[in-house]
Image (spheres, rainbow, N blue to C red):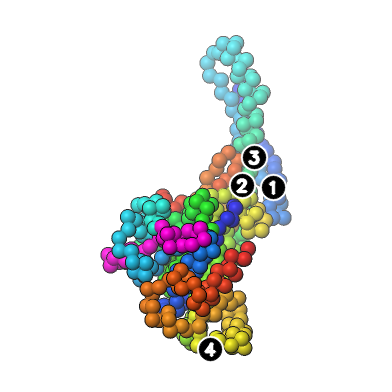
Amino acid sequence: MTMMGKIVAVHSYKGGTGKTLISINLAAALAEHGKRVCLFDLDFRAPSLSTLLNVEKSECWLNDYLNGTCEIDKALLDLSDKIHNGGKLFVGLANPATEAIRDMSAKDRKWEMRALGRILALRTSLLNDKGFDYIIMDTSPGLQYSSINAIVSADLVLVATTFDRSDVDGTRRMLRELYDLFEKKTEVVLNKVLDASSKAGKEEITSKVNDVYQVPLLGIVPCFCDILKARGGVIFAQEKPDHPFTRILEEMAAKIDKMA
Amino acid sequence: MGQVSNEPVFVLTICFVNNYACVVRLNKLLLIYHNVGAKTDEEDALSNQEVVGKRPLQVLEKIRENLERLNEKIEVMIELQKHGRKDLQAPLSDAPLDVMTLLSMPDHLRKTAMTVCRMGRATAEEISEQTKRARAVESAYLNQLVIMGHLKKERDGRKAYFFVDRENQG
């Protein structure tokens, strides 16, 4: 088995921790550095990438690919025209229609097993055959089938978390009872941090995260009012290259790129 | 006329499996070459050639295949004894290998099952290269997963391939 590209799953215990924000900006940051990236919305219960990217209709959704009714090529939208430095950014979207959400919620174990096979097959079809460098998978929070399918298929799992107490507890349990069982390389992204401006503050947070989760900390994302104001309408890594959030995402992308 | 042998052939073989020595007697192997009716000299010559050349080789190959299958069964039995048969609580003919099933598996089987999931279709040897465990151990785990209904097994010549039958389940 030759490992060419890398599959990164972005997951969390709770909703609202910033998975989609991190996924879309990480994908854009990697593409801006000349990488060929595929971004997938695997949150079939609450699809959001289609709204953020203003896509209302698609010839084929990721739902259709997992249902076995279309090839992956047809489920990919090319957004490379907004990317500089020769990078490529493709997205595969979850169907946001209520009927599609209801349909995906009613799938049985056998369907989920086939879906896992189709997600695993992306390594061959996209990374090996089409030469993509990265597949970034935005997942739904908690223990959902689609999320665990993504985790099983991934080379690296990024756990988006906050200092919210229930999130800390749940994330710690999930690290031990989910990622460890699948022997997945896992790194934490701490989001919405209030005091991360000073070096001492960052060191204290890093040490705290290492103590609590006992996995490496990939990055600390402070609470930015600009992100809240943008209401998901801005891809910072593309549109605001000088914003501090973009620089943090670029650092994270560089660290991921250096990983074996 | 060709020769007719209806004497049973007893083969005594010793298999070494995970440091267990097992004496196996294949007493059902009957080499019977029936030669019904009259044959021409040419047919006789061809038939004799078969007995002397090709057939014994086929028989030996069959013995070897049977011994390999027997080895696999013994490996499974040894593993089941080791784990107190806990892994085979409900043998199923078609048990989907979904992620929740993977999560509920004992660690040693999960590792094997996940490797098969990733590789698609592989032999015990190929799986053992990935898991860094002994081939015999992987063979036992793979056969357990087959018995549990999570994997399918098919032979291609002397090689046994294991895979998840995703398309034909359900």
Label 2 sits on residue: B70
Which of pointers 2 and 3 lies earlier in the amino acid sequence? Answer: 3
The answer to if A93 sits in the magenta stretch is yes
Label 4 sits on residue: A195
Measure the alpha-carbon separation of dots 4 and 1.
67 Å
Is A1 located above or below residue A156 in the figure?
Answer: above
- Given the image, what chain letter belongs to the residue carrying mark 2? B
Label 1 sits on residue: B15
Answer whether labels 2 and 4 touch (C-beta < 8 Å). no
Using the rendered image, report if marks 1 and 3 lie on a common chain: yes
The kind of residue tagged 2 is: Leu
Identity of the residue drawn at 62% across and 51% down: B126
Which of pointers 2 and 1 lies earlier in the amino acid sequence? Answer: 1
The kind of residue tagged 4 is: Asp
Q: Nearer the viewer, residue A88 or B166?
A: A88
Q: Which residues are magenta?
A: A78-105
Identity of the residue drawn at 61% across and 79% down: A214
